[in-house]
C-alpha cells in the first residue's frame, strides 16, 4: 500500500477502514494525492456526557484492536477512520478531533503500557491548578508544582512520580520533543485541551513515538476539568508481555542529534589543531593558539544548537532505501552499524547550513542565534565571514575524504549535488540582497517564487539526494526528489512568510520583520500584483528609506494593505498547491518506506496552525517592535 494514497480527506468522505487499518482511498497504488489541509477549528467538540465519552472510547478501543500496529498510521488515515466511526454512531463531525486523540491513544495503549514507567514522560497542563493561592513557581521547563494537595495536579503527579515517571507541568512545551530526541524517555502520556493536543501530540504521532492523552473537558483555562479516572488509569497502565511495536523515526532523530554532541562529534570531526581552551573564560579564544581559533569557533557554533533536520533527512532516506531497519524496535542497533563515512556525509549538509546561518546573520545584522550573541557581533565581521567559509570547506572535506569507503563515483555525485545546492543558494541569496539594496521595490510573484526555489529548496534536495545516493543508484528517483524538494522548499518559505505576520512564536518575535528588514517576500509581490495603482504606490512608499512613519505605523499600514489585497489567503492556497505537487512527486517513487518518509516530512516541515487574521498590538514604549497577535 502506498503511503500517500490515503491523503484525500474531506467532510463528505465515505472511506471504509479495513481491518488492517487501510482505507478505500489507499487501495490504488498510484492514486493522485489531494491536498490534505483543511480547517479543523469546528471539529474540536468534546462529547457532553461521561456516558457518551465512555461509549466512544470503547468504540475506539475496538477499532484500534483491528489495526496493523506495526506501521506508522498517518493523521489522514486516522481521520478517515474517525469519520467512519462517527458516521456509524450518527454523530456530528465536530467530534472528529476528540475521536482522533482517543483513537491514537488506544492505538498506542499497549506500547505505552509495555514501556517502563521510568522511561515515560507525564505532561500536565497548568490550567488544572487552582489559580488563587497556587504556590507553584515557573522555570524554563514549566510550572514547578509543589505537593500542596490543593488541586488534581498534585494527585496525578504523586501517582506518576511514585511509579518512576518524569513529570512536566508545561502545556505544549517545545521542550518535549527535545526530551524525546535526547533519549531520556520512550513514551508520552499527557493531559491537555484539544487545541494543544493537536499541536503537541501531532509530531509525536507522526514520528511514531508511543503516546496517550486525555483531553480536557473545556478549552477555557479558567474553568476546566478532566475525566480524572481516565487520567489515573492512563498513568498506571502496565503490561509485561511483548507487544507489537510501531515503526518509529525516533532512533533516527536521536542519532542525527547525537552526531553533534559528546564523543561522537569529536570522533567524526577530529580537531586538526590543539584547539581546546586553556582556561574557564567565556571567551572561546582565550588561551587558544591563533591558528586554531577558526576551527574552535566553527565547531563550537555547529554543536551549539538547531534541529539537525538535514542530517536526519539524509539518514532516514538512506534507511528507507536500504530496508528500513532503523525504524524498527531495534533501530538503535541498526544505526550502530552505520559507517563513519555515512554519518559524516549526513553531517556535511549541516556544515553548509550552519555556514549559511553565520553569513545570513551578517547580511541581516541579526543580534542573536541560539540564544547567544551572533558570531559577527561577538567576534567581528571579518572573523564571522571567515568562520562561515571554513564551515563550507569542512562540509566538502567530510565527503571528499570518504571517497575510499563510499566509492569515487558515489563521493563525486554527492559532492556535485552539494556544490549545485551551494551555488543555487548563493544565487537566491544574491537576488534577495540585490532587491533589498535596490531603490525600486517592485517584485512579481514569479520572481519571488524563483528566489524561494533557489534559497530554500536546495538544502532539502541535497539532504535527500545524499541519503539516496549513499543507498545506491538514483537514476529512477533523482528527478522526483528534485521536484519534491523544490515544492516543499517553496511551500516552507511561504509558510515562513506567513509566520512573520501571524504570531508564529517559533519563527519571528515581531510582526513584519521582513518588511522592516527590506527582504523580498511573496506576500509583498502578491500585494503589488493585486492592489490598484494608488495603493501600490502607497505600499512602495512604506518601504522607502525616506518614509517618515515609525516602524509601528509602517507595519500597521502594510498589514492593512496586505489584508486589502487578500495576500494571506492567496499565500495559503499557494502552500497547498506546492504541497500537492510535492506529494505527487513522492507518489511516483517506487519505495513505500521512502514515500512514508516524504509524507512525514511534508507533515512536519509544513506543520501549521489554524490561520488567523493578523492584527497589530501596541506595546508600551520599551524599544520593542510591535508584535502580531491572533485575531
Image (cartoon, rainbow, N blue to C red):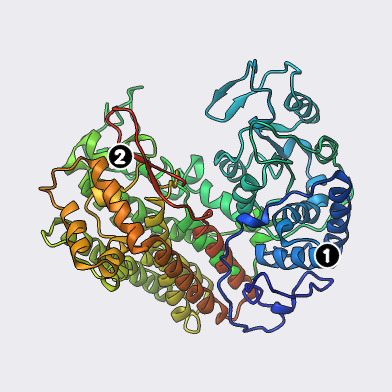
Query: In terms of depth relative to the viewer, which is nearer, 142 or 616?
Result: 616
| Residue at left offset 17%, top offset 61% | 537
| Residue at left offset 89%, top offset 47% | 51
Residue position for label 2:
297
In this orientation, does residue 386 appear?
no
Vertical position of residue 258 compared to residue 407: above or below: above
In this orientation, does residue 93 appear?
yes
Location of residue 410 by image quarter: bottom left
- Lateral position of residue 311 relative to residue 520, left or right: right
Query: Which of the marked residues, 2 or 1, is nearer the chain's N terminus?
Result: 1
Q: Which mark is residue 90?
A: 1
- Lateral position of residue 32 relative to residue 428, left or right: right
Vertical position of residue 237 compared to residue 534: above or below: above
Question: What is the x, y in percent for residue 263?
Answer: 50, 41
Q: Look at the numbered disc 1 and give the secondary structure of its residue.
A: loop
Question: What is the x, y in percent for residue 416?
Answer: 33, 72
Location of residue 393 by image quarter: bottom left
Q: Look at the numbered disc 2 and give the secondary structure of its residue.
A: helix
Q: Which mark is residue 568?
A: none
Q: Residues within 10 Å of mark 2 (few under 14, many from 20)?
A: many
Question: What is the x, y in percent for residue 12?
Answer: 69, 73
Amino acid at each position: 500500500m502506498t503511503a500517500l494514497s490515503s491523503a484525500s480527506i474531506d467532510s463528505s468522505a465515505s472511506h471504509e477502514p479495513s481491518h488492517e487499518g487501510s482505507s478505500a482511498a489507499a487501495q490504488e497504488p498510484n492514486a493522485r494525492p489531494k491536498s490534505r489541509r483543511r480547517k479543523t477549528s469546528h471539529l474540536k467538540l468534546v462529547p457532553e456526557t461521561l456516558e457518551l465519552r465512555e461509549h466512544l472510547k470503547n468504540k475506539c478501543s475496538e477499532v484500534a484492536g483491528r489495526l496493523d500496529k506495526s506501521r506508522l498510521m498517518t493523521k489522514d488515515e486516522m481521520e478517515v477512520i474517525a469519520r467512519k466511526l462517527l458516521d456509524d454512531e450518527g454523530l456530528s463531525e465536530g467530534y472528529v478531533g476528540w475521536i482522533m486523540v482517543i483513537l491514537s491513544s488506544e492505538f498506542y495503549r499497549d506500547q505505552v503500557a509495555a514501556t517502563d514507567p521510568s522511561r515515560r514522560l507525564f505532561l500536565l497542563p497548568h490550567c488544572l491548578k487552582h489559580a488563587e493561592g497556587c504556590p507553584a513557581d515557573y522555570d524554563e521547563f514549566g510550572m514547578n508544582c509543589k505537593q500542596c494537595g490543593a488541586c488534581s495536579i498534585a494527585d496525578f503527579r504523586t501517582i506518576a512520580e511514585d511509579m518512576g515517571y518524569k513529570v512536566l507541568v508545561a502545556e505544549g512545551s517545545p521542550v518535549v520533543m527535545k526530551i524525546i530526541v535526547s533519549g531520556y524517555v520512550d513514551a508520552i502520556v499527557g493531559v491537555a485541551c484539544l487545541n494543544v493536543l493537536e499541536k503537541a501530540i501531532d509530531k509525536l504521532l507522526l514520528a511514531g513515538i508511543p503516546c496517550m492523552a486525555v483531553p480536557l473537558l473545556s478549552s477555557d483555562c479558567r474553568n476546566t476539568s478532566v475525566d480524572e479516572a481516565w487520567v489515573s488509569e492512563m498513568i498506571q497502565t502496565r503490561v509485561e508481555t511483548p507487544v507489537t511495536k510501531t515503526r518509529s523515526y525516533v532512533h533516527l532523530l536521536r542519532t542525527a542529534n547525537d552526531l553533534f554532541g559528546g564523543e561522537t562529534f569529536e570522533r567524526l570531526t577530529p580537531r586538526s589543531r590543539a584547539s581546546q581552551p586553556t582556561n574557564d573564560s567565556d571567551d572561546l579564544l582565550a588561551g587558544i593558539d591563533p591558528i586554531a581559533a577558526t576551527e574552535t569557533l566553527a565547531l563550537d557554533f555547529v554543536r551549539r544548537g538547531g534541529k539537525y533536520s538535514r542530517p536526519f533527512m539524509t539518514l532516514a532516506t538512506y534507511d528507507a532505501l536500504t530496508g528500513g531497519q532503523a525504524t524498527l524496535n531495534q533501530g538503535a542497533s541498526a544505526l550502530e552499524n552505520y559507517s563513519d563515512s555515512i554519518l559524516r556525509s549526513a553531517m556535511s549538509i549541516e556544515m553548509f547550513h550552519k555556514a549559511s546561518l553565520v553569513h545570513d546573520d551578517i547580511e541581516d545584522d541579526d543580534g542573536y542565534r541560539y540564544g547567544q550573541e551572533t558570531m559577527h557581533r561577538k567576534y567581528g565581521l571579518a572573523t564571522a565571514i571567515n568562520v562561515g567559509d571554513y564551515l563550507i570547506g569542512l562540509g566538502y572535506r567530510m565527503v571528499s575524504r570518504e571517497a575510499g569507503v563510499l566509492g569515487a563515483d558515489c563521493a563525486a555525485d554527492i559532492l556535485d549535488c552539494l556544490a549545485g545546492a551551494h551555488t543555487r543558494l548563493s544565487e537566491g541569496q544574491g537576488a534577495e540582497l540585490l532587491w533589498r539594496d535596490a531603490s525600486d521595490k517592485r517584485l512579481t510573484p514569479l520572481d519571488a517564487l524563483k528566489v524561494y526555489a533557489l534559497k530554500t529548496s536546495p538544502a532539502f534536495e541535497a539532504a535527500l539526494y545524499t541519503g539516496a545516493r549513499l543507498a545506491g543508484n538514483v537514476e529512477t528517483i533523482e528527478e522526483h526528489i528534485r521536484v519534491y524538494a523544490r515544492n516543499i522548499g517553496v511551500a516552507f518559505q511561504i509558510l515562513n512568510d506567513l509566520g512573520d505576520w501571524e504570531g508564529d512564536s517559533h519563527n519571528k518575535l515581531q510582526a513584519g520583520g521582513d518588511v522592516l528588514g527590506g527582504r523580498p517576500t511573496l506576500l509583498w509581490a502578491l500585494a503589488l500584483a493585486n492592489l490598484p495603482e494608488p495603493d501600490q504606490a502607497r505600499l512602495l512608499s512604506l518601504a522607502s528609506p525616506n518614509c517618515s512613519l515609525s516602524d509601528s505605523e509602517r507595519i500597521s499600514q502594510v498589514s492593512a494593505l496586505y489584508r486589502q489585497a487578500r495576500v494571506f489567503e492567496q499565500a495559503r492556497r499557494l502552500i497547498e498547491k506546492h504541497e500537492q505537487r510535492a506529494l505527487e512527486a513522492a507518489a511516483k517513487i517506487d519505495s513505500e518506506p521512502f514515500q512514508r518518509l516524504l509524507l512525514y516530512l511534508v507533515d512536519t516541515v509544513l506543520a501549521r496552525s489554524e490561520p488567523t487574521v493578523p492584527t497589530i498590538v501596541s506595546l508600551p514604549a520599551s524599544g520593542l517592535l510591535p508584535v502580531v497577535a491572533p485575531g
